Image (spheres, rainbow, N blue to C red):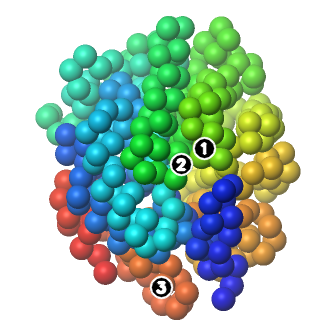
Amino acid sequence: MTALFESTQLANLKLKNRVVMCPLTRCRALGNTPNMLMAQYYEQRSSAGLIITEGASPSPNGLGYARIPGLFNHAHVEGWKLTTQAVHKHGSRIFVQLMHCGRVGHPLNLPEGARLMAPSALAAPGTMWTDAQGPQEYPVPREMTENDIKIAIGEYAHACKLAVEAGFDGVELHGANGYLIDQFLNTGSNQRKDAWGGSVKHRAHFALEVVKAAVAAIGHSKVGIRLSPYGVFNGMSPDPAMDELYIHLAKELSALRIAYIHLVDHSSMGAPKVSDELKANIRKNFRGTLILSGGYDRERAEADLSSEAGDLIAFGRPFISNPNLVEKLKAGVELTPANPDTFYSADERGYTDYV
């Protein structure tokens, strides 16, 4: 038995191993409501010590992609209960990722009355898939007013309460990959001159206010956050103050005593590498659990756990096509490759039919 497969603590929770299943958008929530097929998918992967679900929007405004789940009404709570009950049967823990897509969306994917909003009126680059009309260019979002920002923070807090009601062990706030929280952090999407943009402290303001609201709603031990320094997904761009920004966040998040930071390094997918120095500085300044993510195999995972670079290791795409990933990693057997053509389709193909 090696460190990757040993039990450990995450805040008040005991995890049966140090393997984390990354949040992976899969687009199977028809009508934006979690269902039995999704519960089967997560149950198949419940050998992980901790599962972090795909992003679930805390607001109708945040449902940017086709068929992603929400967590803002009673039907969503009942739908997610299917998943939490299925996973808990196998002794795994599960956090729901709260992902407000912000500008990464299209009106054709939003319910009636919802609005595409972001820190600044800057469109994301590229196109967005819509079931109604296929690929569409991203529209220019509405720049959020002070009231919009206040409402959005409240929606995160409300979703946190619903998460506990649905049986989740906690929530992960999606502050990475170019979604709403990251849009406030990044100068590629935030050109505000007020208290929500400009300086490092002002750009971090929204993220920290959302975290404070989540902590007030459900307690610090049930809250984590995902961060992606130097990420370029969805039009994000590095800037000269990037290291300063994330060290500031690490210090402030540590003071709020949240359960974990989930740190993503997308260099394995072509993004700039998060330097070992920045990772070490985040580690030094954050007293909670540090989850490391980005292109891991067993050997690298064991090395980073052994050196105490992180406490838990998250695996993403390998979990798509290897529901029994933990057992395969233990046995050292070859992993099944995934079929990207079925990543975001609507049925069980490439979803629950892997063995």
Closer to the camera in the image, 107 or 311? 311
Q: Where 147 sits versus 226, above or below?
A: above
Q: Amino acid at mark 1?
A: Val
Identity of the amino acid at label 3?
Answer: Lys
Residue 328 is labelled as 3
Q: Is residue 67 left or right of residue 233?
A: left
Circle on res. 189: none
Callout 2 touching callout 1 (CB < 8 Å): yes
Name the residue rendered at 14%, 34% in the picture: 132
- Toward the front, the furthest residue is 165
Please name the residue shown 36% across and 60% down the image: 85
Of circles 3 and 2, which is in front?
Answer: 2
- State the residue position of label 1: 223
Would you say residue 324 is visible in this rendering?
Answer: yes
Left or right, 24 with respect to 176, comes to left
Give the residue at x 34% y 58%.
83
Estimate how packed mark 1 is, as few (under 14), some (14 to 19) or many (20 or more) residues with alpha carbons within 10 Å.
many
Quarter of the image that includes the C terminus: bottom left
Marks 3 and 2 in Cβ contact (< 8 Å):
no
Q: Position of residue 297 (x, y in %)?
A: 58, 75
Name the residue rendered at 47%, 12% in the picture: 148
Please identify the quarter of the rendering in which residue 146 is found: top right
Q: Would residue 241 be found to the left or right of residue 232 on screen?
A: right
- Name the image quarter holding residue 237: top right
Q: Position of residue 58 (x, y in %)?
A: 41, 32
From the image, which quarter does the N terminus lie in? bottom right
- The answer to whether residue 341 is visible is no
Tag of residue 170: 2
Q: Secondary structure at mark 2?
A: strand
